[in-house]
Image (cartoon, rainbow, N blue to C red):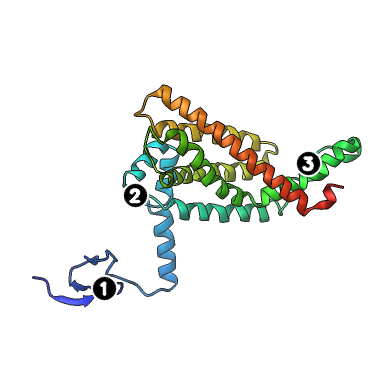
Amino acid sequence: MNAIHAECKNCHHSLNEDDKFCSKCGQNTDTHKINLHYVIHELVHGILHLDGGIIHTTKALFTKPGIMVREYLEGKRKNHFSPIIYIILLSTIMVLIFHYVYHDRFIEFSTIEDLQNKTEIQKRILEIFIPIGNWVSKHLTLIYLLQIPLMAIAFYIPFRKMAKYSYFEWLIVISFCMIQIMIITIVFQLLNRILPGINFVANIFVFATFTWTIFQLFSKFNTGKLIINYILSLIILFFLLVLLSTGFVIYYLNSNPDFIR
């Protein structure tokens, strides 16, 4: 019988000499002092660890997304990076790109034809919607996060009888899809500095990747019903986004009365 020589620093459960993990709470028994070496190790382990880090999860999201999401919902989560933490990380990257690459102005007047060559109505429209476009770009992370519960509702309603996933499970499904969308957006935001105007291609990749994920997730179900439910979900999502966008425009115009005059 192994001699008891210490206790878990997390739950104070007694440990044996050869215990690598606490049998009660699961914490690693070999806890290191928090210093520079510890921080670097945790960063490398958390982000680059091939069996459960960002690289592993990202690869799965772009090679077998639906299968990975299904397995995650079924409980196979040990080897995957937390979708919530991943979204926070990507959100930070997007904010930094917008600030340092686009200098907080994604749309510039100089990217459009000289305003002198436009009619008064065209000038007025540009004066209104360019600031709105810049505001949207600056708060793109917030907009993405707001879309997650909306998209979860839109897909939960038509699919609730097919897969019987709860609304909260749909939040996880959409969170993984949002990670895909954010990664594609980041890549094309950077490419747009080299190839101006290429951003519209990102929409094609986003729609194709999202569709692929949902269809692979429900690949075991009837294809006809899957297509119908998918179309219904997109219709519901469209109306929800229209309501959200309308509310945003009204809020923005009310907050900037000079644009209404």
Q: Nearer the N terminus, badge 3 or badge 1?
A: 1
What residue does disc 3 label?
A: 111
Give the residue at x 55% y 34%.
236
Distance between the alpha carbons at the discs numbered 3 and 1: 61 Å
> What is the quadrant of the N terminus in the image?
bottom left
**Residue 119 badge:** none
Q: In x, y percent, where is residue 230?
A: 48, 30
What residue does disc 2 label?
A: 77
Q: In x, y percent, where is residue 194?
A: 67, 42
Residue lying at the far bottom of the rendered structure: 5
The reply to whether discs 2 and 1 touch (Cβ–Cβ < 8 Å) is no
> Mark 1: which amino acid?
Cys
Q: In x, y percent, where is residue 87?
A: 50, 52
The reply to whether discs 2 and 3 touch (Cβ–Cβ < 8 Å) is no
Residue 197 lies in what quarter of the image? top right
What residue does disc 1 label?
A: 8
Q: In x, y percent, where is residue 217?
A: 39, 35
Give the residue at x 17% y 72%.
17
Q: Nearer the N terminus, badge 2 or badge 1?
A: 1
> Mark 2: which amino acid?
Arg
- In the image, which is nearer the foreground, mark 3 or mark 1? 1
